[in-house]
Image (cartoon, grey):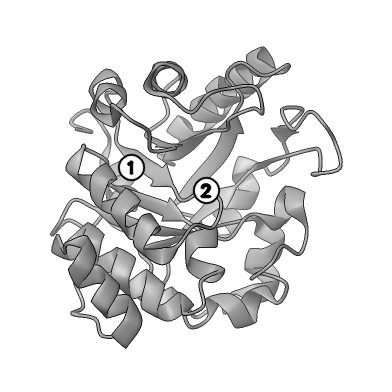
Amino acid sequence: MWIKMDWGMKNRLSKVISPKTGKTVMLAVDHGYFQGPTTGLKELKKAIDPLIPYADCLFITRGMLRNSVDSNTNIPIFLRVSGGPSILKDDLSDEHITTSMTEALRLNAVGVGMSIFVGGVNESRSIANLGKLVNEAQTHNMPVLAITAVGKEMARDARYLGLACRMAAEQGAHIVKTYYCENFTDVVKACPVPIVIAGGKKIPEKDALQMARNAIDDGAIGVDMGRNIFQSENPVGMIKAVRAVVHDNASVDEAFKIYKKGWFNSC
């Protein structure tokens, strides 16, 4: 994994993916780029400040980074650089690159991320945009995270997600974010770069921990989770529990006890 990467690329990735465990807990708080002030993130700074100590990385937009994250924090930043339609539109695939590589470097990001829409109306443009982003990112040894967005008409199954992840890897993405599904090992085997799973819509805490446990067991290197953490009744307890699953190999029952008690054995 990453044998041919230059030192700068490897160094950036080592800030996000633990050299000790080879895993990562990324905290996704970029939802406002198309959802606006979604539940749990209406006051973003207030929501994320207690969570930052337990995250390996924040996935966030430049505006919220500047306005809601203290500049003296040591949390590594993956910057969302794509955007376009809001939830008011039927077609969310009409995205463009909205943040330049210069801006990402200016903000001291360790990586950049964008969505691709395989099967969507604007599939071709999103794939082309990913290729262009990778071209520019490689010049600066900047890792690229590709997010496999799923259209309303697309099934979240191994066949579709395997296609989307493989296409992202073929364009040069260094990490791929996708959804967990049945036969997830098939998705992982077909994708030669590391995969992190999305949390998706809010589900019961124990179910979310089970999903994370299954994903790690099936070959994912971690999570890029948002709503199942910041919309939890106990967000700090939940991120501690997720971290225990990812980094400490905790069982679901062990992690759920951590969620309820707020106890955590730091990795």
Instruction: Please state the horizontal and vertical placement of residue 117, each as a whole percent of the image.
Output: 61, 24
Residue 3: x and y, percent? Answer: 18, 31
- Residue 122 visible in the current orientation: yes
- Along the line of sight, the residue nearer the viewer: 245 or 74: 245
Amino acid carrying label 1: it is Met
Residue 172 in percent (x, y) is at: 41, 23
Q: Which mark is residue 249?
A: none
The percent position of residue 127, horizontal first and vertical second, equals 58, 19
Residue at coordinates 22% horizontally, 28% vertically from top-left?
Answer: 4
Q: Report crowding for label 1: few under 14, some 14 to 19, many 20 or more residues within 10 A (C-alpha).
A: many
- Which is in the foreground here, disc 1 or disc 2? 2
In screen coordinates, is 180 left or right of 48? left
> Which label number is shown at residue 200?
2
The residue lying furthest to the right in this view is: 88
Q: Nearer the viewer, residue 149 or 214?
A: 214
Q: Are marks 1 and 2 in contact (CB under 8 Å)?
A: no
Amino acid on which disc 2 is placed = Gly
Query: Residue at position x 46%, y 37% from top?
Result: 144
Note whether 69 is above or below 143 in the view shown.
below
Which secondary structure, mark 2? Answer: loop
Picture quarter containing residue 179?
top left
Closer to us: 182 or 9: 182
Helix, strand or loop at label 1? It is helix
The mark found on residue 9 in the picture is 1
**Residue beneath the point at 35% across and 63% down:** 206
Q: CA distance from mark 1 to mark 2?
A: 28 Å
